Amino acid sequence: MSIHQLITERFKAALITVSGRESVDPVVQVAGRPEFGDYQVNGVMGLAKSMGCKPRELAEQVIQKIDAQGLIAKMEVAGPGFINVTLDAHFIISELQRASDCKRLGVSQLTPQRVVVDYSSVNLAKEMHVGHLRSTIIGDAVARVNEFLGHTVIRQNHVGDWGTQFGMLVAFLVESRQDPMANVDLSDLESFYRQAKARFDDPAFADMARQYVVRLQAGDPEVLALWRHFVDVSMSHCDKVYEKLGVQLTRDDVRGESAYNDALPGLVNDLRERGLSQLSEGADVVLVDEFKGRDGEASTFMVRKKDGGFMYGTTDLAAVRYRAQVLKADRSLYVVDSRQSLHFQQLFVVARRAGFVPPEVDLQHIAFGMVLGKDGKPFKTRAGESVKLNDLLNEAVQRAQQLVAAKNPDMPEHQQFEIAKAVGIGAVKYADLSKNRTSDYVFDWDSMLSFEGNTAPYLQYACVRPARIALRVGAWKDSIPFSLDAPMERALGVHLMRFEDALRTMARDSMPHVLCAYLYDLASAYSRFYEHCPVIEGEAVNTSRLKLSNLAGRTLAAGLELLGIAALKEM
Ligand code: ARG
């Protein structure tokens, strides 16, 4: 159950009673300091102002009127009119028991919605590089959390698999291989792409490439088969990176640009016939006056070039329609870097104006910033090339292996390697997910692999402690109730109860860092508990503490899993 919701509802009812208004929205926040209680309620001040009475007096009235039964132990007016709320220990205890008894840790399912998440969506024919990292892992975490909360999540990998460069690549495939359909090893896609491009200087090749484009677009079966083969090879490269990253995308989630190809001419004609687009220097454009260019004129969204070719945005119009009408999305999320922000704003306006997407469907661009090097510029290799994701992930595992080996010199090497994979990949992902996605961040090996601070290794290590305790204790009796007498026990207990709220906020705003911050605070609360409240003293096991420790371990592991990060039992 959402504690936040519960408290909000009780206060809402009380505020309505004392004010006589039809509706009042209190702002309930987690208290910033222990002396403020567990939650702080705001919203009385504004109400008092509009009613012409004293905020602190109104707050007192609210406290008199509220139904505190079974939820709140203590309330206090603070400052200019806040209300500090301390929860009832019995309530916390029963919530903890409920979470402890439940596979889902007590997290309830929301009214299911259909949530489409467009993520990763790389352009094929090139190797995945660091620029693809953020969409891939942020999207994956967003998808997992929505699914866990009970939504039907439909992943869409909108890969760039169509366009003139594919004609060129197929031409080069034919030219450079004896049997272009044989299982070619394009282990170095980059160089294949570069070589093909270089061949373009030869007019004969350029001519052939153009013919291939025409044949591809005309649906020539032979060329289509070659194209499919090439796309398949490119996709296998992505699959390997997804697997290394522990990202849940599969081939079933791929619906690339090519899938919308047949819909484009009809779509563009439809816009023209309905007067939604107009001709501008021979091209079909939609004027979007909601967004103005530098000159103050309406911005334009081009759907067909002068030469008849379609645009990135034309395909996206077909896709946004498909997602609303065929996939029946209630929410359609696009996890794409913030440089495409104008594109998506225009897309959404045009899609709604054309009636492709009903007003009640939520369209959102889940934008994110760039990965920077330590010099504050876009992250590149020393040679100034884009960093291949595969290399980056290998390096992460290697670096982690050194750390693990230093910590556990006696551990067998294969075990070190398994842990290193979880720690290295986890570190890269967590360093990204833990930052507010809207800003850029600096990629820094040392800080992401540190065992201290808000990092994956710190959290993974926090999972190991409860696992070790559980192993040492063995069987125990669950009938012994939780008790929260020590302040560190209570603090851990209250934080554990807030898991559902953290997940809901993360899903509502598609902000993974909210969940990261929650888990970091949980690990810290656990750490304080661990130091002050021994679970095992001499021979005696404190069962309530053991239960708290286990629940903390399960919650941490579940949270990491929802971020797509492996939890560990040993490291
Ligand atoms: N392939 C595009 C790129 O690399 C991203 C696609 C994002 N999704 C979308 N529906 N436009 O820039």
Image (spheres, rainbow, N blue to C red):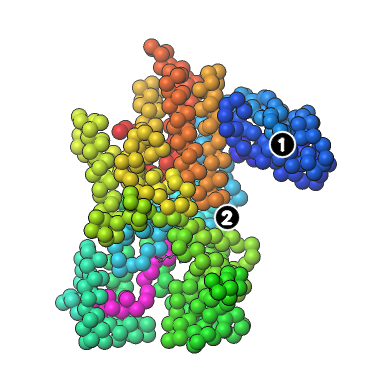
Q: Which residue is mark 2?
A: 113
Q: Residue at x 66, y 29 (%)?
A: 85
Whether residue 171 appears in magenta in the rendering, the answer is yes
The quarter of the picture where the N terminus appears is: top right
Task: Residue at the far top: name it.
Answer: 538
Mark 2 vs mark 1: in front: 1
Left or right of 50 in this view: 263:
left
In what quadrant of the picture does the C terminus appear?
top left
User: Residue at (67%, 36%) from the top-left corner?
Assistant: 41
The segment highlighted magenta reads 157-174
Q: Residue at x 27, y 60 (%)?
A: 385
Q: Quick check: 442 left or right of 177? A: right
Task: Look at mark 1 in the image and give the residue it sits on.
Answer: 10
Q: Quadrant of ligand 1?
A: bottom left
Q: Tag 1: residue type? A: Arg
Report the front residue among 264 and 150. 264
Counting from the top left corner in percent of width and height, residue 166 is at 32, 76
Percent from the top left, x then y, of residue 141?
45, 50
Magenta span contains residue 432: no
Using residue 197 as the reference point, say whether residue 497 is left or right of it: right
